[in-house]
Image (tube, coloured by chain):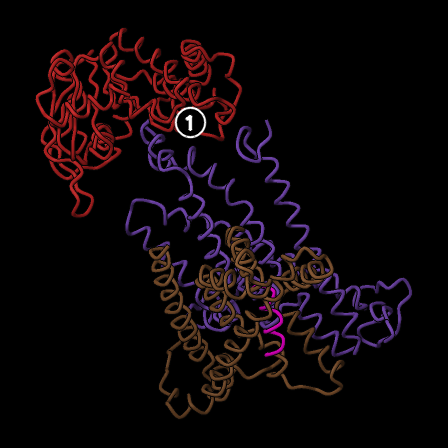
Amino acid sequence: MNLDFAFLTPQVLSSYVLKGFAFSLQLTLVAMLGGIALGTVLALMRLSSKSWLALPAAAYVNTMRSIPLVMVILWFFLLIPLVTGRPLGAEMSAVITFTLFEAAYYSEIMRAGIQSIPRGQVAAGYALGMTYGQTMGLVVLPQAFRNMLPVLLTQTIILFQDTSLVYAIGAYDLLKGFEVAGKNFNRPVETYLVAAVIYFVISFSLSMLVRKLQQRIAIIR
Amino acid sequence: MNWDWQVFCKDTIDGEIVPRCFGGPGDLTYLDWLLSAWGWTLSVSLLALLVALVFGSVMGILRTTPHRGLVFLGNAWTEFFRNIPLLVQIFLWYHVVPALILPLRDVPSFLLVVMGLGLFTSARISEQVRAGIQSLPRGQRMAGLALGFTLPQTYRHVLLPMAFRIVIPPLTSESMNIVKNSAVAFAVSISELTLFALQAQEETARGIEIYLAVTGLYFLSAFALNRVFHFVEQRVRVPGMIGGGQ
Amino acid sequence: MPMIEMKNVSKWYGAFQVLADCSTQVEKGEVIVVCGPSGSGKSTLIKCVNGLEPFQQGEVRVNGISVGDPKTDLPKLRAHVGMVFQHFELFPHMSITENLVIAQIKVLGRGKDEARERGLKLLDRVGLRAQADKFPGQLSGGQQQRVAIARALAMDPICMLFDEPTSALDPEMINEVLDVMVELAQEGMTMMVVTHEMGFARKVAHRVVFMDQGRIVEDDLKDAFFGSPRSERAQQFLSKILHH
């Protein structure tokens, strides 16, 4: 068959794809920031010596990590209206789902990061008269965060790719934008190809940046 | 809320509850459908795992050879399949590949999904295999060559036996990921667990029961694979190594 | 014809020159010891002999065969040049016996029984017959290195290369390995040995080569070397080594 990309004019792209692209980015950013924040809390809970904190956090993380993301998306889409009493819309549901889901993965990264900090650092914090919160917030977490930055960013690239799975509940994201354009112009082959190229260019360049960052961090240490 | 597990005993066509929960030929209950969906999930996962192990190992090995061209091929393969979302890759296999390569038109979509999921995962396995080989002491390769082994023999007898032992744990989690990732096959109408969940939930309005059953089966499948890999890991332990018995 | 002949060998890692114009030779039946401070290029030099390290300039011949020639069948050449490494490099997933027979079978094409018999005989010779069914990880460093020597000997080498064979060993294990090497030397094996063990050099070496910063600074008969090394670097090196 002959490929013909001529129909993908700037107008077509902006009316079909731009909205979806914006949502994909928004979803990635919100889920990253929310996921890292919640993930850090979960990590601190899991590392706590109090089992009433550690056990629920471990159960949450392990459950999330053992269910396919698509099923998690479907679960939340089903459950959120039951909890809130009214339908929420696929996009909002996706934002909540991804934040809570990614928190489980980010928490594992943060946990490894915190554990990589020598125990002497905590002792030194306490010895200076700091509270638990100060020791974590001023001494441990900044170091853990810096050590884990490349891994956190790599997870974010995976998150960006995974946002395409909101397809399951029909949310309008980057992939959906291309799919709709492909259907309307009867050129699905071309639109899927272009979608693949765009995802590739974004993910590949981000992972190159992460690699650069990793080398710089390796030198600083 | 009220549970209604009887939903699985219902006939998929008239919604009547079938005694003993299993229907006959051409007359399926939701339980029949669930089990057949589980079968599809397992088939897609296991075949994709096979594809992923073969291609991932080859590409991972190529990346550790002294030949620049082969290293480039392995790197390019890995970057390509790692940086496109799985769902997009599935769509490429389902909508684009058969349109561009006409002989593939008659290939069942099940096999296209197996290739899509398999090659996507091969990029991750290539990373693990490469890391495994590179984690071996450099002297091992030299010792093999110094004994007169050719490079392929050095891989076959010296490097790979140890490298594969090292990568069993990460391969275990990749194999569990494959089961989870096989859920995207619903998007191209493979009648596996997630598609069952979507459709049965719509037909019966008993979403929670349906989702619980499906989630449980995903969990069970991944856990079973985990046990299989754990068994292999135990079997190939090397005496005198860390974690190996005396 | 010398067994090993190196002529003007030079090698660079990028812009950094690791070997500069190195020439020496080892006659049949001769034992030469290569020493020098760490980073002087001695390990790299010995790995050029069997082509484990490629070099950009010069020529290396083993038994008349050019190592740098792309047409040379390197695996075939290496099969008859035994090598012993600093970190033993036994294959951890194989039993001691398997370590001894694998290359005999796969490289030399010997039958299983013949290879096994040869392997066990050499294991006996290094005093480790009882360990035949163990795995490398279950042996001490000294025992592993003796197995590694037996593994090299099982290939019936025409010469042997030793790359710091005792420097990864605990002090109490060094002698058990050196004893095996001395015995080999006294039997007339052609040997090129990178080592700091000057006692070994005094006992069996014919010549001593001293390297510094990628160059061969001294290449003397043993007595001349220990009597009065010509270069200041070698004198300094010797005084440091011998006073420890």
Q: Which residues are magenta?
A: A95-105
Q: Which residue type does callout 1 highlight?
A: Leu
Q: Position of residue B145 (x, y in %)?
A: 32, 31
Magenta segment includes A19: no
Position of B238 with respect to B7 (left or right) is: left
User: Label 1: chain?
Assistant: C
Residue at image x 23%, y 24%? Answer: C240
Residue at image x 16%, y 31%? Answer: C212
Q: Position of residue C153 (x, y in %)?
A: 34, 16
Position of A183 with respect to B211 (left or right) is: left
Q: Which chain is red?
A: C
Q: Which chain is purple?
A: B
Residue B199, located in which quarter of the rendered image?
bottom right
In the foreground, C111 or A172: A172
What secondary structure is the stretch in magenta mostly built from? helix
In the foreground, B45 or B216: B216
**Chain A colour as displayed:** brown
Q: Position of residue C163 (x, y in %)?
A: 29, 26
Magenta segment includes A104: yes
Q: Which residue is mark 1?
A: C90
